[in-house]
Amino acid sequence: MIDIHSHILPGIDDGAMDEQASIAMAKQAVAEGIHTIIATPHHKNGQFENKKDFILQQVKKLNEIFSIESIPLIVLPGQELRINGDVLADYEAGELLTLNRTQYLFIEFSSGHVPRYAERLLYDIQLKGLTPIIVHPERNQELITNPDLLYQFVEKGALTQVTAASITGGFGKKIKKFSHQLIEANLTHFIASDAHNITSRSFNMQGAYSEIEKEFGKNIVYLFMGNAELLVKGKQVYKEMPQKVKTKKFLGLF
């Protein structure tokens, strides 16, 4: 299994606090069946700045540590970029790191808001030959309230990644329901852990895939797993035709 979103690098954001915490996370990941993981530390989220060259150095160090510890987990480089107006300039300046240096770029919204310039920026990112992946859209309050906005982003070429714990109810019933709706509407393309530690924000990948198989069948599980492999190789991922999230009528009204 491949996990494309994690905070396993030690001491650089709100993920693993130190090398021992990274080792503990790695052992838990392997126990879950994960053999390859992308380290995606926060960048420009108002609290942390982790530029491309620094992340590459840290990933190399962590792989060396896991080798010494005989932990069969390969760490690949990535970055979780908070959306901002300087994305394209920072990319040109060599500060941004795509996932495993492919064409795929993580884009994070704040938990409560989607900036008005988001649609244009996602389009401009694609003009650079990159494919933006919106991370954990199911946890964004504006998208929960207005899922048609996410439909527009996906319909125009953006991809999305849902957090494993969201699917299993780790962030509450409302977010679990919305996560399932996104899968049903073909509005997400990847499942990933977004793991920060081994306790409150762990991997939950097996549980998520079990839930998906139960609700949507094995083929959807294979699609998500296959897309993670394709992403790491820089190949085009599988996409079903996006649909709008169905809103149920209440007393004859939408």
Image (tube, rainbow, N blue to C red):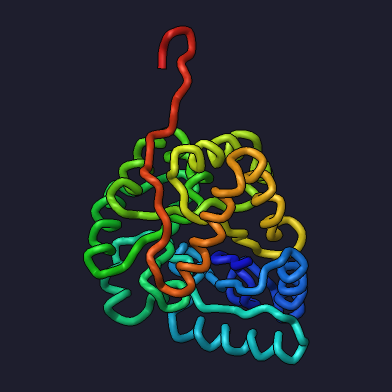
Tell me if I can see residue 31 in this picture.
yes
Which quarter of the picture shows residue 113? Answer: top left
Q: In x, y percent, where is residue 34? A: 67, 68
Q: In x, y percent, where is residue 220? A: 55, 48
Q: In x, y percent, where is residue 108? A: 44, 57
Q: In x, y percent, where is residue 169? A: 67, 42
- The answer to whether 134 appears left or right of 13 in the picture is left
Name above or below for residue 97 compared with residue 250: below
Name above or below for residue 197 compared with residue 242: below
Q: Residue at x 48, y 72 (%)?
A: 232
Quadrant including the N terminus: bottom right
- The answer to whether 126 appears left or right of 190 in the picture is left
Name above or below for residue 47 compared with residue 121: below
Count of number-bearing discs:
0
Residue sitting farthest toward the top: 251
Tell me if I can see residue 49 in this picture.
no
Q: Considering depth in this image, is 13 or 165 the residue closer to the camera?
A: 165
Quadrant including the C terminus: top left
Q: Residue at x 38, y 34 (%)?
A: 244
- The answer to whether 54 appears left or right of 244 in the picture is right
Q: Residue at x 38, y 75 (%)?
A: 96
Q: Which residue is drawn at 71% across and 89% down?
A: 67
